[in-house]
């Protein structure tokens, strides 16, 4: 990992070997695990990583989303749905 220095337990150069029970092959795999956790309302993810030849365990607590923290795509879809509903009900 690079660009994470000072963000918590992970440091630049750490290698994530397991996240949420899977061995990720890419950054996208890690993102998918985090997204899946949010979808399932799970706010703790365990994992493993290597640092300078040593294996480490990690437990990461994700912040719980607030109502206004909905993804932009969801908000846009709701606005589009409301707009089409309003158009359908106009005389």
Image (cartoon, rainbow, N blue to C red):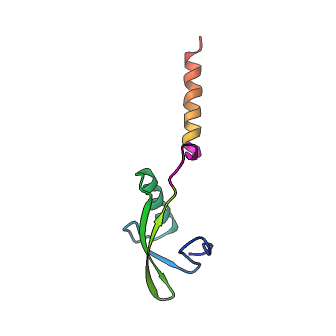
Q: Is residue 18 visible?
A: no
Q: Is 79 drawn above or below residue 38 in the view shown?
A: above
Q: Residue at x 36, y 68 (%)?
A: 21
Q: Is residue 88 visible?
A: yes
Query: Would you say 70 lies left or right of 29 here?
Result: right
Q: Residue at x 41, y 68 (%)?
A: 46
Specify the quadrant of the image occupied by residue 70. top right
In this rendered view, identify the residue nearer to me: 60 or 90: 60
Residue 60 within the magenta-colored segment of the rendering: no
Specify the quadrant of the image occupied by residue 11. bottom right
Instruction: Classify the position of the C terminus by image quarter.
Output: top right
| x and y percentages locating residue 38 in the rendered image | 46, 53
What range of the chain is rendered magenta? 64-73
How many discs appear?
0
| x and y percentages locating residue 53 in the rendered image | 47, 89
Q: Is 40 drawn above or below residue 30 in the view shown?
A: above
Q: Residue furthest left?
A: 21
Q: Residue at x 47, y 60 (%)?
A: 34
Q: Residue furthest bottom?
A: 53
Instruction: Classify the position of the N terminus by image quarter.
Output: bottom right
In this rendered view, identify the residue nearer to me: 43 or 70: 43
| x and y percentages locating residue 24 in the rendered image | 44, 70
Q: Residue at x 47, y 82 (%)?
A: 50
């Amino acid at each position: 990992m690079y660009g994470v220095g000072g963000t918590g337990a992970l440091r630049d150069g750490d290698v994530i070997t397991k996240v949420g029970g899977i061995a990720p092959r890419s950054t996208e795999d890690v993102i998918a695990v985090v997204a899946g956790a949010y979808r399932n309302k799970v706010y703790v993810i365990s994992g493993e990583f290597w640092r300078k030849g040593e294996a480490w365990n990690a437990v990461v607590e994700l912040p719980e989303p607030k109502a206004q923290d909905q993804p932009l795509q969801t908000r846009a879809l709701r606005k589009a749905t409301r707009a089409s509903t309003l158009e359908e009900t106009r005389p």
